[in-house]
């Protein structure tokens, strides 16, 4: 929202959590947005319960970015689902494996055949980018009565074009981490609680850092570089900036 590139901001305490003791402020800054989005995708949009998932799998498309990096770790640490991550470059393949992915498939090639070759049929699919180009394949490969969750902004997504979507009785959900604060929902405190939980997991070593670069002190130049990196579609993990207070 306007003003979020400012050095100082006033934030509602219900959507803020404790900084991990094991990280400085810059590194810790890479976690709130990514953690909230990943947590809500998994436990709200997909309605997954902690500890479930034995024998089932979750497919994560675009898994090497900031949200995907924390999402893979949450799935592996808090559920029993196996993770199929998509990546297409050597460095992103290596990264999602480091985050804990059990399998990696290439999103530049048709996904249904690749997933079938693994002997798996995901119950859930999370698409972090490129939904328009992948939705047909997702509907084909997912289990009946499965759930699909996305965070990107496809300009022309018409699910009525796909008869199998209804025949499989699939559920579709959009995740937007700002929904709770924008609409002042009664459960806004849930974001503080999940951030504190993630902070504890970081300090205990259950979650490793997803920060891959500190671009330096906050300035017009470093902000521009940060935005260009995010817009490139090739970012791995999360980049952060320092602020002098």
Image (tube, rainbow, N blue to C red):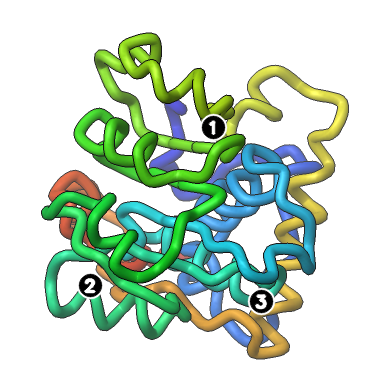
Q: Where residue 136 sits in the image (x, y, percent)?
A: 28, 31
Front residue of this view, candidates 143 and 203 = 143
Q: Where residue 153 sits in the image (x, y, percent)?
A: 33, 26
For the residues bearing labels 1 and 3, Cβ distance under 8 angstroms: no
Q: In this image, 158 relative to 146: left or right?
A: left
Task: Please indicate, yes or no, whether residue 27 appears anywhere in the rendered image.
Answer: yes
In this rendering, the answer to whether 104 lies above or below 121 is below
Camera-side mark, 1 or 3: 3
Task: Please indicate, yes or no, whether residue 226 appears anywhere in the rendered image.
Answer: no
Q: Residue at x 16, y 58 (%)?
A: 234
Q: Residues within 10 Å of mark 2 (few under 14, many from 20)?
A: many
For the residues bearing labels 2 and 1, Cβ distance under 8 angstroms: no
Q: Residue at x 74, y 38 (%)?
A: 12
Look at mark 3 in the image and give the residue it sits on: 77
Residue 92's label in the rendered image is: 2
Q: Residues within 10 Å of mark 1 (few under 14, many from 20)?
A: some
Looking at the image, is mark 1 or mark 3 earlier in the sequence?
Answer: 3
In this rendering, the answer to whether 46 lies above or below 221 is above
Q: Where residue 11 sits in the image (x, y, percent)?
A: 67, 40
Q: Where residue 64 sits in the image (x, y, percent)?
A: 32, 65
Q: Secondary structure at mark 3?
A: helix
Look at mark 1 in the image and give the residue it sits on: 176
Camera-side mark, 2 or 1: 2
The span from disc 2 to disc 1 (Cα, nearest Å) is 25 Å
């Amino acid at each position: 929202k306007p003003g979020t590139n400012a050095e100082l901001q006033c934030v509602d305490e219900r959507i803020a959590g404790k900084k991990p003791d094991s990280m400085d402020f810059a590194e810790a800054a890479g976690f709130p947005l990514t953690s909230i989005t990943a947590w809500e995708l998994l436990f709200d949009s997909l309605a997954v319960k902690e500890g479930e998932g034995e024998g089932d799998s979750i497919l994560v498309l675009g898994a090497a970015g900031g949200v995907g990096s924390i999402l893979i770790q949450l799935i592996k640490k808090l559920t029993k689902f196996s993770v199929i991550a998509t990546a297409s470059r050597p460095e992103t393949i290596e990264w999602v494996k480091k985050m804990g992915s059990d399998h990696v498939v290439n999103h530049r090639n048709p996904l249904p055949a690749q997933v079938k070759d693994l002997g798996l049929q995901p119950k859930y699919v999370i698409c972090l980018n490129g939904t328009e180009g992948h939705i047909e394949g997702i509907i084909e490969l997912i289990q009946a009565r499965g759930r699909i969750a996305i965070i990107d902004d496809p300009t022309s997504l018409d699910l009525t074009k796909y008869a199998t979507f209804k025949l499989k009785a699939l559920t579709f959900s959009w995740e937007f981490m700002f929904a709770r604060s924008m609409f002042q929902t009664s459960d806004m405190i849930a974001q503080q609680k999940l951030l504190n939980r993630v902070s504890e997991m970081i300090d205990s070593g259950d979650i490793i850092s997803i920060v891959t670069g500190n671009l330096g002190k906050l300035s017009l130049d470093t902000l521009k570089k940060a935005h260009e990196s995010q817009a490139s579609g090739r970012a791995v993990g999360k980049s952060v900036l320092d602020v002098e207070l």
